[in-house]
Image (cartoon, coloured by chain):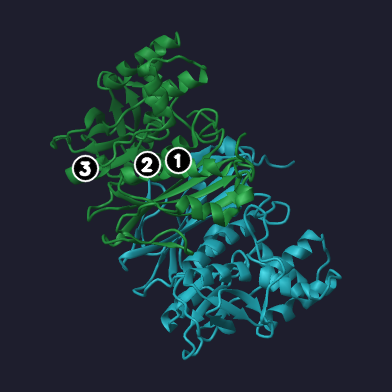
Chain colours: A cyan, B green
Amino acid sequence: MTQHDPTLGELGEFAVIDAVAAGRAHPDGVLVGPGDDAAVLATPDGRTVVSTDMLVQDRHFRLDWSTPQQIGRRAIAQNAADIEAMGAMPTGFLVAFGAPAETPARMATELSDGLSEEAAKVGASVVGGDLVTAPQWVVSVTALGDLGGRPAVLRSGTRAGDVVAVSGELGRSAGGYALLAAGATELGPELSALVERHLTPVPPYGQGAVAAAAGATAMTDISDGLITDLAQLAEASGVGIELSTTELAPDTDALVVAAAALSLDPAVVNEWVLGGGEDHALAATFPSHIELPERWRAIGQVVEQPGIRVDGQAWQGPAGWDSYGATR
Amino acid sequence: MTQHDPTLGELGEFAVIDAVAAGRAHPDGVLVGPGDDAAVLATPDGRTVVSTDMLVQDRHFRLDWSTPQQIGRRAIAQNAADIEAMGAMPTGFLVAFGAPAETPARMATELSDGLSEEAAKVGASVVGGDLVTAPQWVVSVTALGDLGGRPAVLRSGTRAGDVVAVSGELGRSAGGYALLAAGATELGPELSALVERHLTPVPPYGQGAVAAAAGATAMTDISDGLITDLAQLAEASGVGIELSTTELAPDTDALVVAAAALSLDPAVVNEWVLGGGEDHALAATFPSHIELPERWRAIGQVVEQPGIRVDGQAWQGPAGWDSYGATR
């Protein structure tokens, strides 16, 4: 005999919200948490950093690939990365969740668990949200952050002569996606780790603030693909960027095993690293006289000539992810 | 010969975002606007108020009833009302928009026009957003606000003996919805105004801060229905509320014409006023010795006995709107 699993529609919006918000811990900066018309966060810096990202079922995640907990973790991670990319630290998240009325309420609790777990990794919490009926799952997250007295690090601040560096992993999400899309099963630990990275990115939390404190001149997170995101940074700064595949070897080397498992041309690892998004690594530029912080590594140079070149050539492969499906 | 109307998918995410963000004015408090990884807002008060609401096509709006501009205005209005209900003033909005790739880009521009127009009414702007593919329209808005040095007005602060008052209109949205749902056409100016109120609510902007400054002890916006929202406020405060239909006459009287046009029992106007949500009026409680601010009117009393009573009786009609369709 199985117990009946109540749905969102049976419990109703207010009961579900009460249940998922109950007992969650909040840091001291959350002056008013969930349950009122709005939340109130402390902003001792006198500024607040804000960003929003929407994830739609079957476009940004699949319920047969990801657990609700993984979807929650990813939704927070990619929003937190946008805050980090300004040189700030996340302070709170708001989550609007749309789902069919027949969704088991248990799945909303698991989503909420993932949201709260990932938020806790950056010392923050989910301070508010909304729960509505939708034909499919939609998870819309807004992240707030604090600059700790530092200037915001924009995309527009780099100049020719700066070093381009990254913190975090590149290409892992694209490699993991290729394995999932090919239906690869019985994966060993190395390949399983790539799949896990696609389902739940691991941004280099704290490194945005580290880069800002070290003197980064421009910064962005890698969400749409390294080439695409660096192209936006270069355009905003009125410069170009030269990348070197030699310097990207730590990333491409880690993906050779996935290309082999899928019997793909080994060169595909360059496409994954240069064109694959969703790893939410951070890319920043630093004046060349600055020693890079510990968890940052150089991958290229800022130059005057506009555009992005790889080993001296304009990149010909897929550049990255466009939300409407066009490869740029 | 008609010109081809480019779609979101044809233009691509980045081009559409650039186009809708171009040339929009921002107040001084927007330190970094759209176009970077995140926006930066000034928070001179040392706190920020935040709230989020998701609107889903065919659940919260219909594209055959509302123009994209009206949808944008409503999305901002209902989020601004949540900020007002804390006693704060909106300072900025983030908008995540999901839509099919074949949506004409013109419609996104019109939506954006509505968002910006309504934000400007409260002296704020759209500071950031996201644009993604979704099977239907989803508009998820986050509002930020500033308390101007005042304490936040929570739902939990009222006590027996306080006066319950409202600012703004009640029941207009429900009356307008009834006219739309009945397919009523050729409406005179009075009925058309009700339909317009349903499509674009008119919150009493600025009155949240006025109530806070005047000494309001608790406040909420009327989004789910007067009874439902007051029940939440009463429960949070551990009290009950007695309402009087006599004091609600300014609202019920204004709806008699709609009940007549639809040949409905005249008593339906009480249901619209007491059970209808989405007008985004503000309801607040004030100590009885305080003179109500100019645009506020008394509608009832806070009492010790829990629950909401109308003219001394527990309300038997529909209580309001639950996102999953259950009438509470």
Q: Answer yes or no: do the residues labelled 1 and 3 have beta carbons within 8 Å?
A: no
Q: Indicate left or right for B105 with B255 as reference.
A: right
Q: Indicate left or right for A261 with A237 as reference.
A: right
Q: Answer yes or no: do the residues labelled 2 and 1 have beta carbons within 8 Å?
A: yes
> Residue at label 1?
B72
Look at the image and tell me whether residue A171 can be seen.
no
Determine which quarter of the picture holds residue B149: bottom left
Q: CA distance from mark 1 to mark 3?
A: 26 Å
Which marked residue is nearer to the observer: mark 1 or mark 3? 1
- Tell me the chain of label 1: B
**Residue B97 location (% of width, % of height):** 53, 47
Amino acid type of the residue tagged 2 in the rendering: Glu
Disc 1 element:
helix
Q: Give the mark nearer the N terminus: 2 vs 1.
A: 1
Amino acid type of the residue tagged 3 in the rendering: Val
Disc 3 element:
helix
Vertical position of residue B196 compared to residue A284: above or below:
above
Disc 2 element:
helix
